[in-house]
Amino acid sequence: MKSNWLLALQERMWGLAPWDASLISDEWFRAHFEYAADVVNQWIGSVLDVRTARFLNFGCGDGITDLSLVLRYGATSIHGVDIRREYTKLPRIAREQLGMRRIPSALTFETITPGAPLAGKRALVDGIMSWSTFEHVQRDQLAPILADLHSCLRPGGYFFIQIEPLFFSPFGSHLRRYDDVPWHHLLASEDELWSIIQNHHGPIDAAEVDFGFADFGVEGYKRFVFKEYQALNRLTADELVEFAQNAGFAVARQERRHVDMPIPAALKSQFADEVLLTNEIFLLLQKT
Ligand SMILES: C[S@@+](CC[C@H](N)C(=O)[O-])C[C@H]1O[C@@H](n2cnc3c(N)ncnc32)[C@H](O)[C@@H]1O
């Protein structure tokens, strides 16, 4: 990826590189460029001026949502951090999906080690967003990471978190690409789940295939996705809110989405209906 000063210079000379959304052919790209960015903008844009606010995206992944926030909503400063380096693919992805030759200088990215503190390294931000990431953070790192993010935010700033699917919901394993049986991860053994994945052949839902798929290949991707499943922190919506409040955040607004499905009898006795049926949380926090 080109250095940011070079991009800024090119932008000053030629403006933002042209882009064309009619070129989008990849469903993963579309889901992030359109849906995820729209939702983030709705929530964070209701409390901050997206055009002037400085943002941190925690767990930015490939950065497609950030790119969209710049191109479609006029964001001018988003720093994405992630423990993986998927964002290095963004220039190629933007070229392929939008015909865009330069990534906007409004975007910067950084690879971090899990749990390494961010506070004090950069100026305080006005807003933080985190999409489909907090269920992947190691449980013992949740409290220190949330406290660190609290310290990265200016007083009065906002933090928007989305998680879907939540672990105890029907497809909370994140394995639906390979196994369509609701709550199977709470009913079957790990060996059974792995053998279903291993025996899966044929295409998987294109909206669930990220740009890392090509690096792993079909079988490698199965191993990667299964490891991700094993590493899920099993956070519930209530627990997330409690962790956030313990880190000093106030809840400004939240929405929980539910599925309407018959709960298997074997699970009814083990978990509350509310936990089993809540598959998504949108949580807007404020540093008061
Ligand atoms: C499902 S992906 C979502 C990525 C991106 N937000 C998106 O919507 O495509 C989860 C991301 O969380 C990142 N992640 C997991 N643990 C993390 C941590 N402790 N710190 C920062 N990022 C983390 C992963 O590397 C991965 O990119």
Image: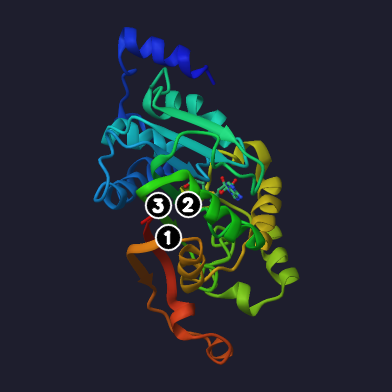
Label 1, secondary structure: give it: loop
Asked whether the beta carbons under mark 3 and mark 1 sit within 8 Å of each other, the answer is yes
Label 2, secondary structure: give it: helix
Q: Nearer the viewer, residue 219 or 185?
A: 185
x and y percentages locating residue 155 in the rendered image:
37, 49
Left or right of 188, for residue 243 = left
Identify the residue at the far right of this view: 191
Q: CA distance from mark 3 to mark 1?
A: 9 Å
Instruction: Kindly identify the amino acid type of the residue bearing the numbered disc 2.
Output: His
x and y percentages locating residue 252 in the rendered image:
32, 62
Instruction: Tell us which disc is closer to us: 3 or 1.
Output: 1
Label 3, secondary structure: give it: strand
x and y percentages locating residue 131 in the rendered image:
45, 51
Q: Residues within 10 Å of mark 3 (few under 14, many from 20)?
A: many
Asked whether the beta carbons under mark 1 and mark 2 sit within 8 Å of each other, the answer is yes
Q: Quadrant of residue 106?
A: top left
Q: Nearer the viewer, residue 136 or 199?
A: 136
N-term-proximal mark, 1 vs 2: 2
Quadrant position of the N terminus in the picture? top right
Q: Is mark 3 within 8 Å of ligand 1?
A: no
Quadrant position of the C terminus in the picture? bottom left
Q: Is residue 75 above or below residue 167?
A: above
Q: Is residue 210 above or below residue 9?
A: below
x and y percentages locating residue 85 in the rendered image:
61, 35
Q: What's the residue at 38%, 61% (across, down)?
A: 283
Residue 159 image label: 3
Residue 249 image label: 1
Left or right of 115, for residue 265 = left
Asked whether the beta carbons under mark 2 and mark 3 sit within 8 Å of each other, the answer is yes
Q: Is residue 12 visible?
A: yes
Please give the residue where the numbered disc 2 appears in the rendered image: 150
